[in-house]
Amino acid sequence: MRAGQWLWLTLAIPPLGLLTTGRLWPFLYLRRSILGFLSPAEVLAKLARAGFTEAAAAPLAAGAVTLYTALRPSV
């Protein structure tokens, strides 16, 4: 699935965006930002360092989306 997502973001989205809007840079930015997301392990580590407890990551849509949940202690 990851390879398919990479191909879609690299070979399909930029040309389709250029054809439909006449602009390429927003779709290249979109690709770069999506591919630059932190891994679930990195997000969970950041949540733990920020003081959240019971942090969990649930992959959805074959891993294209991840739902994060965590509890914030009362202050």
Image: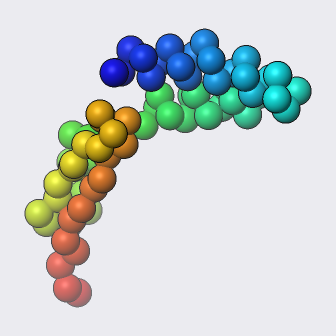
Q: Residue furthest left?
A: 54
Residue 16 image point, x, y percent:
73, 22
Which is nearer the eye, 72 or 24? 24
Residue 57 in sight in this render = yes
From the image, which quarter does the N terminus lie in? top left
Q: Nearer the viewer, residue 18 or 56?
A: 18
71 versus 54 height, above or below: below
Q: Residue at x 82, y 22 (%)?
A: 19
Q: Is residue 44 left or right of residue 6?
A: left
Q: Residue furthest right?
A: 22
Q: Count the labels in the image.
A: 0
What residue is at 29 percent from the left and 44 percent from the top? 60
Residue ID at (62%, 17%): 12
Query: Is residue 23 in view from this perspective?
Result: no
**Residue 68 position within the rendered picture, expressed as x and y whole percent measured from the top left:** 27, 55
Q: Is residue 55 left or right of residue 22?
A: left
Name the colour scheme: rainbow
Query: In which quadrant of the rendered view does residue 71 lie?
Result: bottom left
- Residue 2 lies left or right of residue 73; in this view the side is right
Viewer-closest of 75 and 3: 3
Instruction: Give residue 67's position: percent from left, percent from top.
Output: 30, 53
Residue 71 appears left or right of 34:
left
Q: Is residue 33 above or below residue 68?
A: above
Residue 73 image offset from top left, x and y in percent? 18, 78
* Rendered-image quadrant of the C terminus: bottom left
